[in-house]
Image (tube, grey):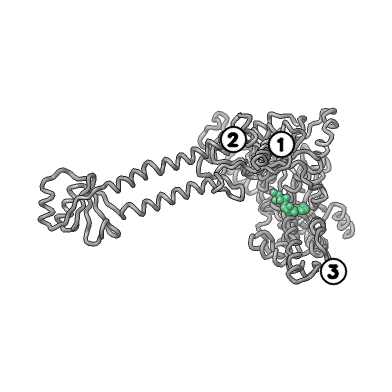
Amino acid sequence: MAKKKEDEKKKEEEGCWEKGSCKDPDLFGPLFRMPNKGQFKFSLWYFLITLFVLLLINSLFVPAPESLVGFSDFKKKIEQGEIVKVQMGENFYYGFTESTGERGRGGTVYRTVPINDPTFIQLMDAKGVSYMKISEKGNAFINFLLTWVVPFFFFFFIWRLMFQRMGNMGSNVLALGRNRAAIVAEGTTGVSFNDVAGCDEAKEELMEVVDFLKNPGKYTRIGGKIPKGVLLVGPPGTGKTLLAKAVAGEAGVPFFRISGSDFVEMFVGVGAARVRDLFRQAREKAPCIIFIDELDAIGKSRVNVLGGNEEREQTLNQLLVEMDGFDSRTGVIILAATNRPEILDPALLRAGRFDRQILVDRPDLAGREAILRIHAKGVKLAPDVDLHKVARDTPGFVGSDLANLVNEAALLAVRNGRSEVTQADFSEAIEKVIAGLQKKNRLISPDQKRIVAYHEAGHALVAAFTEGADPVRKITIVPRGIGALGYTLQIPTEDKFLMTEKELYSRIDTLLGGRAAEELVFGTVSTGAANDLVKVSDIAKRMVTEYGMSPKFRNVALNQRQPALLGPTAEAPQMYRDYSDATQSYIDETIASIVNERYAQVKKLLEEKRPLLEKLASRLLESETIEEHEFAQLIKESA
Ligand code: ADP
Ligand code: MG
Ligand code: ZN
C-alpha cells in the first residue's frame, strides 16, 4: 500500500507533464484544498477570515465606544453629575453615565489616565458616585492575545505560504518536479483542424505553423524565419483555445498550456519564475508549443491587494526577455490568445515577439452552419432538422454559443421523451440561448442590423462607382470585435507609396458612403459612422494643411510643429503654428466645406443607385457576407 503511494508520487515528480495530469502541489494542506485552481483568490480568503475573526474577538471583549478624556475633564464630568459610577483600574479609570450599563453597552464610557490626586476620592464621595477598584488582568490578557499572538500566527501563516511558493520556484533541482506541475501540458490534444470551423483564414495561417513544427528543416534550410509568437485575437467563444489545441494535435508535439492568470501571483517574483521555468522546460522538449491563454492577464495591469502591479510587470518583463532570448529555429512556437488586444502592452506586439496576429472572427452564416454540423455529429437528429435554417436563425452566435445550442436542443429532446432532436427542439433552444445572450447584451437587434447592412452597402457601392477607389474585397455585417458592427474590406491593387488628390477624394467618398446611405434610407443618422468620420476629417485636414490641396493655400504646407528645443519632459506639449489664427479658421472652414461637398456628391450617387443599394443591403441581411466575386456580379447585373 505504502509502496504504491510512493510510486505514484514518483510518477508525479517525473514525466507526468506528458499526460497533463499534474495538479498544483498542495500548498494549503488538505483541509483548505479547493476543487478549482484559484489559489491566489484563495489565499485572500485567509486574509479575510483572519480579519473577520479579529473583528469578532474585538467586538466580544472590548467595551462599546469609549472616549478618552483628560483627567481634569473626567473630574468635571463627575462634578457635573454626568458620571455616576467609576471603575478604577491600574492603567485607566472608567466613568459610566446613567445610560450606560455595566462595562458600557450602549452610551459612552469615559476613560482617563489617572493622576495621583488625593482629592479625587473626596470628590466622588461628595457627589455620591459609586466607585470600585478593578483588576485589568483579564483585559490585559486579551490585549496581549490581540497584539501579539494573533498577528504572530497571521504572519507566520503568510510567511509559510510565501516560503512554500518560493521554494517551488528555486533553482533547486528537486523542487522543479513540483514546479513543473504549475504548467498544464498535454502531449497530444486529440483535437484536429476538422473540429474547428467558421474561421478558415485563421486555420490556414495556423496550418503554416503546423507545417513548420512538422518539418522545421524545410524552412530553416532556406534561412526562412517563422514567427516566434502568434497571437490569436477575437471575441470570447470563437474558438481560439480550440484552434491552439488543434495546432498541437495536428503537429503531434508537446503542448504547454497555461493561462495568463496563472502567472499573476500574490508574491512578487513568482510569476516571473514560472515564466522562466516554462521556457526552460519548453526548450528541453522542443519542438513544442507554448500556449498562453488569456494573455491580457499578464499583458495588462490589474488591481491586486498585495503588490499586484509590481508582480505583473516582472512577469511581463520576464516573458519579453524569454521571447527575445530564443530563436524560433529551436522549434518552440508561442501561441497566445486574447479577446482584448487593445489593452495589451505594446511591447508584446513588437517585432520578434507576437508579431503575427491572427484574427479569429465571429462566424458568418456558412461558418455557423459548419460549426453546427461539427457539434451535431454526436447527436441523433430527426430528418426534419435543417441546420442551414438553424444557422440562419442564429446571427451573432459564436462557436461556444452554437455548441451550447446543440446541447440545449438535445436536452430538450430528452426532457420531452424523444430519442431524436427535432427542428422544434432547435427552435426552442435558440429562443432560450438568445434570451441569455440578450441579457448579456451580446446580440444586436434586427433594427440595428438593418442600419448596419445599409451602412456597409453604402460604403461598398460608393467604392464601386468612384474612380480611384480601391476595389471591394468583402462586405460583412458580422460584428467584429468591440465597436465595429460590420466592415467593408478594400485592398489596394498595388502598394501605394503616394496618393493622388483624386484618390484621396475617392477615399473620403467611400468613407462617407456609410452615413449617407443611412440618411437616405432611414432619414436619420446613427453613431455607427463615428469611426468613418474620424478618418474623413483626418484626410481632409491633411489635404489642407500638409498636402497643399486647398484652393487658397494651394501648394503651401501649414504644418504645426512641436517646439524643437523642448524635450519630452516639457510640461505641456504645446504645438506651435506657423500660421495665423485667421488661417486656422480658414483651415477649419475648408475642411468642413470639403466634407460637405463630398457628402452631397455621395448622397446623390446613392440616390441614383438606390435599387442597387437595396439589393446589396437585403443580400447582406440574408447571408451577412458578400465576397468579391458576388459583389462584382451584382454590380454588373445592375448596369
Ligand atoms: P475562446 O478560447 O475563443 O474563448 P473556445 O476555444 O474556448 O473559445 O471555445 C469554446 C468551445 O466552443 C469549444 O470548446 C468548442 O466546443 C466551441 N467552439 C468555439 N468555436 C468553435 C469553432 N470555430 N468551431 C467549432 N467549435 C467551436
Ligand atoms: Mg479561450
Ligand atoms: Zn462605416
Q: For label 1, count other residues whose C-alpha is less than 10 Å away and answer few (under 14), some (14-19) or many (20+).
A: few
Q: Secondary structure at mark 2?
A: helix
Q: Is residue 2 something that shows in the picture?
A: yes
At label 2, the amino acid type is Asn
Front in this rendered view, residue 169 or 540 = 169
Q: Is residue 168 above or below residue 404?
A: above
Q: Are marks 2 and 1 in contact (CB under 8 Å)?
A: no
Rendered image: mark on residue 15? 1
Q: Real-space Cα distance between discs 2 and 1?
A: 17 Å
Q: Residue at x 80, y 68 (%)?
A: 419
**Front position among marks 3 and 2:** 2
Q: Are marks 3 and 2 in contact (CB under 8 Å)?
A: no
Q: Secondary structure at mark 1?
A: loop
Sequence-earlier tag: 3 or 1: 1
Q: Real-space Cα distance between discs 3 and 2?
A: 58 Å
Q: Determine which residue is flagged by label 3.
A: 384
Front in this rendered view, residue 494 or 34 = 34
Outermost residue to the bottom: 416
Q: Is residue 548 above or below residue 390?
A: above
Q: Residue at x 85, y 32 (%)?
A: 218
**Front position among marks 3 and 1:** 1
**Front position among marks 2 and 1:** 1
Q: Secondary structure at mark 3?
A: loop
